[in-house]
Amino acid sequence: MTFNIISNTLLIYDEILSKGFDGSFFINGLSSYFRDLLISKDNITIQLLEVGDKIKENYKEYANKVDVNFIYKALDITNACDLSY
């Protein structure tokens, strides 16, 4: 990940917070997104998602582009962040 991407990400996050969005909700939502990606990696478990078929297709497409180890690491980070927020 380049420094520019990190900088832009931090600026976007700051903008979200400055508009009054609670950081805890942001972290919880991000964690839920990673869980949904993990569920979407398998054709059987994707049925657990309570979304429409088109959204399931999108999740499946995104999940196939991401390594499962990245998702596990992201879940670890977001869970730790949530606990210490």
Image (cartoon, rainbow, N blue to C red):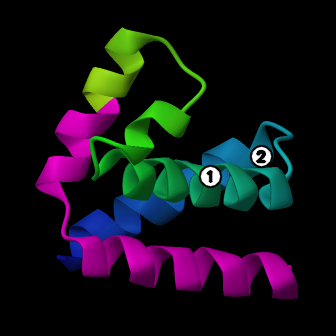
Element under disc 1: helix
Q: Position of residue 18 (x, y in %)?
A: 77, 46
Q: Which residues are magenta?
A: 59-85
| Picture disc at residue 32 | 1
Total residue callouts: 2
Q: Residues within 10 Å of mark 2 (few under 14, many from 20)?
A: few
Q: Specify the principal SS of the magenta part.
A: helix
User: Residue 50, which numbered label?
Assistant: none
Q: Amino acid at mark 2?
A: Ser
Q: Quadrant of residue 5?
A: bottom left
Amino acid type shown at disc 1: Ser
Q: Which mark is residue 18?
A: 2
Q: Residue at x 24, y 68 (%)?
A: 4
State left or right for residue 38 relative to residue 49: left
Instruction: Check if residue 82 falls in the magenta segment.
Output: yes
- Nearer to the camera, 54 or 46: 46
Which residue appears at 45% of the width and 32% of the height? 47
Q: State the CA–CA distance, disc 2 to disc 1.
A: 22 Å
